[in-house]
Image: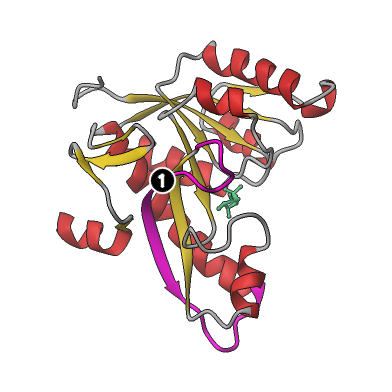
Amino acid sequence: MIKHNEKLPIVVLISGRGSNLQSIIDQAASGELPVDIRAVISNRPDAAGLERARAAGIETAVVDHRDYPGRETFDAALARCIDRYRPRVVVLAGFMRILTPGFVRHYRGRLLNIHPSLLPAYRGLNTHQRALADGARRHGASVHFVTEELDGGPVILQAKVPVHPDDTPETLAARVLAEEHRLYPAALRLLAEGRIRLDNGQALLDDRPLETPLQLDRLTAGAD
Ligand code: GRF
């Protein structure tokens, strides 16, 4: 159990741009978010996010999936690399590999992901395009515990955005991404404060079942 005055040790996994990573780095650096980013690990050596980590003086590592014959061996190597840093929580921030059930079980209750939709709507890829094609009026992003079901684990926190009539997948993605940058640090703060945990496949907030995901706007309004 993390005490309230301790920083939550985390490792962040990325595959690309790393803008969510940057928001976590920035809030950790400003003291708003009590996490200790022990390392940033990428499956792609050219991920731009690695440079963001280096610029912030954070240790980086690459476990290139192309060096392994299959998912099991890759995930085993990835877990070995992660565990060297002894994180309490593993943060998937644009990590574009499907993880094996064994990997997910190893980090049960300690593995988080951010997904660009209001889960359970639009699991998987091309979420913005699919929301527009459906004529959705609301869209957004979710932070959830990772379970063996792809994008199916209990959702902790969501942020909603309106869909505008003239939106393209790009304009909608940009609106959602701006919210993601507030959302992930806010969800991590709840974990760092020991307020959220996974118990028997269910997310608990302050030891009570979280029946519906928390909403970022209400959370921040409540904090004022
Ligand atoms: C984000 O849209 C996130 O929701 C999804 O992948 C994207 C990562 O972006 N899982 P970035 O690498 O954090 O900029």
- Give the residue at x 24% y 62%: 218
Instruction: Give left or right: position of 208 versus 113.
Output: left
- Position of 69 with respect to 7 (left or right) is right
Residue occupying image coordinates x 24% and y 56%: 219
Residue 6: image location, x then y, percent: 25, 22
Q: Quadrant of residue 209?
A: top left
> Would residue 116 appear left or right of 219 to someone viewing this image?
right
Query: Which image quarter is the C terminus in?
Result: bottom left
Question: In this orientation, which residue lies closer to the viewer: 110 or 174?
Answer: 110
**Is residue 165 part of the magenta span, yes or no?**
yes
In magenta segment, residue 31: no
The residue tagged 1 is 154
- Give SS at disc 1: loop
Q: Amino acid at mark 1?
A: Pro
The magenta region covers: 147-169
Residue occupying the point 23% across, 34% down: 193
Residue 5 seen anywhere in this rendered image of the structure? yes
Q: Nearer the viewer, residue 46 or 54?
A: 46
Residue 30: in sight, yes or no? no
